[in-house]
Amino acid sequence: MQQRAEETRKTLIATAAELFNCRGYGGTSLSQILAEAGLTKGAMYFHFAGKEEVAAAIIDEQHRQWARRVGQLADSERSGLERLLWLSSAFGEDLQRDVVIRAGIRLTFESATFRDSMSDRYNDWIGVARGLLEDSRWHRELHVGTSPDAHAQVIVSAYTGVLITCHGLDCLGDLVTRLGAMWDALLPGLVAPQLLDHYRSLSRRLHSSRPADQPPVAPAVDGPDPTRENAPVQ
């Protein structure tokens, strides 16, 4: 019984995610979700009170997957900016592969239309980016006078902008390479000149395009960091 209930819940979330991702929250009705899933209202009410709770569950799952990626960086010895570039690429690949994650991001953008503010999610994203940039500033890898908080907000804004643009242009297959182009534009104003070539090369490698059936080549997030030994003095 418990296994069947869990399978029903997964079916609801997967079906709703497909519809929310294509049509948005306002363009998707509860009856459409149930019809596509082949389920009754009674089966849904065992798990969710309505469409808003289904959407909230998708947003929560997306955020858990993002937090899982962040957790993979916890014990890394790499520089903060290297970890941020890895996170950018890895989560971009997650978005390409998983419709629940894509739907969660779209619903986060649209959340003002159906629930209270989602500012906590944006603050989480900004907070992680700020912490990683603070690490790189402490190791003298950034321009003198760089504000980790200001740049974290710019990076999160640019990243979400790329996601919105790719969705609007229906170019999901190019998402990771477009994120790489974003970093190409941002890095010169962020990184100390002595390290710009290193970070540009790393970003281009992490955000390189590859065939859809080729698994992602995740960079190592531990081990010695070649940028730390001779960090430029600021």
Image (cartoon, rainbow, N blue to C red):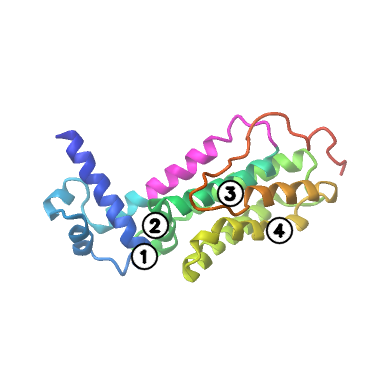
What residue sits right under mark 1 in the picture?
22
Q: Which of marks 4 and 3 is nearer the N terminus?
A: 3
Q: Check whether the beta carbons of the residues at disc 3 and disc 1 lie within 8 A of each other.
A: no
Q: Where is residue 130 in the image (x, y as percent from the top left)?
A: 64, 47
In primary-sequence order, the first of circles 2 and 1 is 1
The amino acid type of the residue labelled 3 equals Ser
Mark sitting earlier along the chain (4/2): 2
Helix or strand or loop: what does disc 2 sit on? helix
The crowding category of the residue bearing disc 4, from other C-alpha atoms within 10 Å (few below 14, some 14 to 19, many at least 20), is some
Percent x, y for residue 65? 44, 43
Overall secondary structure of the magenta section = helix
Q: Give the range drawn in magenta.
A: 59-78
- Residue under circle 3? 89
Marks 2 and 3 sit apart, C-alpha to C-alpha, by: 18 Å
The label number, if any, that marks residue 103 in the structure image: 2
141 part of magenta stretch: no
Type of the residue with mark 1: Cys
Cα distance between the residues tagged 4 and 2: 27 Å
Measuring 80% from the left and 50% from the top, which residue is drawn there? Answer: 197
Q: Earlier in the sequence, mark 3 or mark 1?
A: 1
Q: Describe residue 173's horizontal placement relative to residue 98 as left or right.
A: right
Quadrant of residue 136 within the rendered picture? top right
How far, Cα to Cα, is label 3 from label 1? Answer: 23 Å
First in residue order: circle 2 vs circle 3: 3
Q: Is residue 212 left or right of residue 4?
A: right
Nearest the eye: 164 or 114: 164
- Marks 4 and 3, how far apart in space? 13 Å
Q: The residue under label 4 is which amino acid type?
A: Asp
